[in-house]
Amino acid sequence: MYLGKLIGSAVVASALMFSAANAEEWRLGHVLPPSHPTNIALEAAAAEILAQTDGRIDIKVFPAGQIGGAKEVLTGMTVGTHQMAFDGAGILSQWNARAGVFEAPFLAADFAHLDRMTASPAGQEIFDELLNDHGYRVLDVWYYGTRHLTNNRGPVNSVADMAGLKVRVPEVALSLAFAKALGASPTPMAFSELYLGLQTGVVDGQENPLPTIDAAKFYEVQDHLALTGHLVQFVAPIVSEAAWSAASEADRAVVLDVFSSVGDAYNQSIVDVEAGLVAALEAAGMQVTRPDRAEMAASMAPLYAEFDSVWGAGTYDAMAAVE
């Protein structure tokens, strides 16, 4: 029996050595903190892929910009220093301007709707362009969150309530145009400075997903929460085509299956968290309003016309046609 154990141990050790010798290490970099739910989900997916491929695909997850910012990671994927990224349409639009359409305000009603857009022929065409032109293969789309508005000036129930409101937005052309289309006064500001900016009145308000509003404790310095739902965002696990091509067909199938199953569970967890946060933020003292999204969406017509040439003629219309 002892000999049998030795033989069994030797076989296992030999298999592990063989797997290690034939392992493909994929370095996945992203900017979210280690404690963020997306990072936890990515690490779970990496562990499951390692197990199911017998160690042949070893995804090393590096959160918090440890191996570079979003642009550095995606650039590294083209030269082989990185194999995977985890980011959204905003950063991808720097390589393919058409990808920016996925972040058009009031385009998607919810994540399920956005998911259908990415899966549509027009959406897949954009992903195909990222693959063919840059070697970026989008493996799945995960739910990042839906952005809403907070402010200190007063309740927002309509577009009229937005007039002159000083709203902090990221320094992104689309975000600036969005605030202007609503009649607000967009004020670019680093996120790290936002809490103080809200506290001191440098800006009246800001817009972010509910988990971010809660985590940043904006309820301490903001009185009003308007559930505008103006932007539904996805984040995506992305692999370089060079790394993907080096893996076997069977192992690629495992990667796709695991990211899909882990992503589904993660997506539902974010939906559940957001549902509970409305009541939690209300309990923390915020007054909650539910503006007419249709009225606000109608005010976006000049924005859509302005960005039509950026996204490509007909791109927005094709996405808007997805039900």
Image: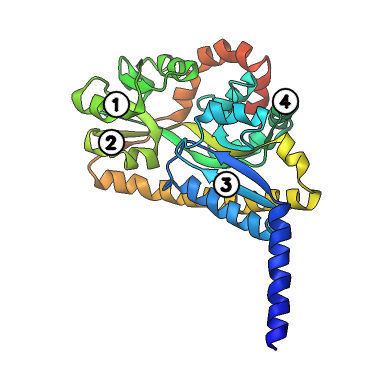
Of tags 2 and 1, the one toward the viewer is 1
Callout 3: SS: strand
| Nearest to N terminus: mark 1 or mark 4 | 4
Determine the residue positioned at 25% across, 24% down: 197
Q: Amino acid at mark 3?
A: Lys
**Disc 3 + disc 4, Cβ < 8 Å:** no
Of tags 1 and 3, the one toward the viewer is 3
**Residue 275 image offset from top left, x and y in percent:** 41, 48
Q: Amino acid at mark 2?
A: Phe
Of tags 4 and 2, the one toward the viewer is 4
Residue 224 vertical placement versus 163 (above, below): below
How far apart marks 1 and 3 lie (CA) works out to 31 Å
| Nearest to N terminus: mark 3 or mark 2 | 3
Callout 1: SS: helix
The residue that disc 1 covers is 193
The residue that disc 3 covers is 60
| Nearest to N terminus: mark 2 or mark 1 | 1
Residue nearer the viewer, 8 or 213: 8
The residue that disc 4 covers is 129
